[in-house]
Image (spheres, rainbow, N blue to C red):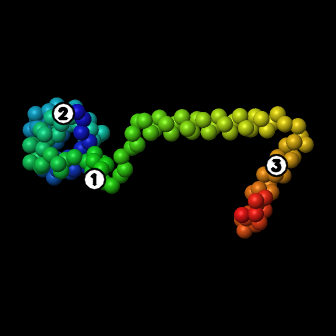
Amino acid sequence: MDVQVDRELIRSEREKRAWSQEHLAAAAGIGARTLQRIEATGIASYESVRALSAALEIPVGELRSGDAAPATAGAEAPPPARLRFALRWVGTAVALAMLAGMGGFLLLHDYQKVRVLRTFEQWVTAEPSLGAANRPDGR
């Protein structure tokens, strides 16, 4: 399992001790190329993190990056897969309905398009306070 680590902390601790990457890798018992990859990407296996923790004499928890735990950082967890699936299909259905409506509008005759657009314009520009007065039932 890969772990997100604070690569700047590893690099600064190594440089504070005036160690080369090869020296730290040998002290931790990992390959030099592995340490180079860890310092470049910030991703390491849990075994490598434990080895670096022991070599640098730093607790494993301090080596982990602050990005690794979104729940502690206050970020929300992503929605469940079922919800994402449902939202995707609802969005698709809405887009298809809009496309069908637009296609139907384009098939109308010009005079029908004008009537639809005028009705829409009246609906958009209507005074909200007049809404109750314009109802046929008088409510």
The relative height of residue 53 versus residue 47 in the rendered view (above or below) is below
Q: Which mark is residue 32?
A: 2
* Residue drawn where x is 51% and y is 39% of the image: 87
* Residue drawn where x is 26% and y is 42% of the image: 4
* Residue drawn where x is 89% and y is 40% of the image: 110
Q: Is residue 4 left or right of residue 100?
A: left
The relative height of residue 68 versus residue 124 in the rendered view (above or below) is above
Amino acid type assigned to the residue bearing label 1 in the image:
Thr
Q: Which mark is residue 117?
A: 3
Label whose residue precedes the other's in the sequence (3 or 1): 1
Q: Is residue 96 left or right of residue 137?
A: left
Amino acid type assigned to the residue bearing label 2 in the image:
Ala
Q: Which mark is residue 31?
A: none
Q: Secondary structure at mark 2?
A: helix
Q: Which mark is residue 72?
A: 1
Label whose residue precedes the other's in the sequence (2 or 1): 2
Q: Is residue 36 left or right of residue 130?
A: left
- Residue in the foreground of this view, choosing between 86 and 132: 132
Asked if one can make out residue 24 in the rendered structure from this viewpoint, the answer is no
Q: Quadrant of the N terminus?
A: top left
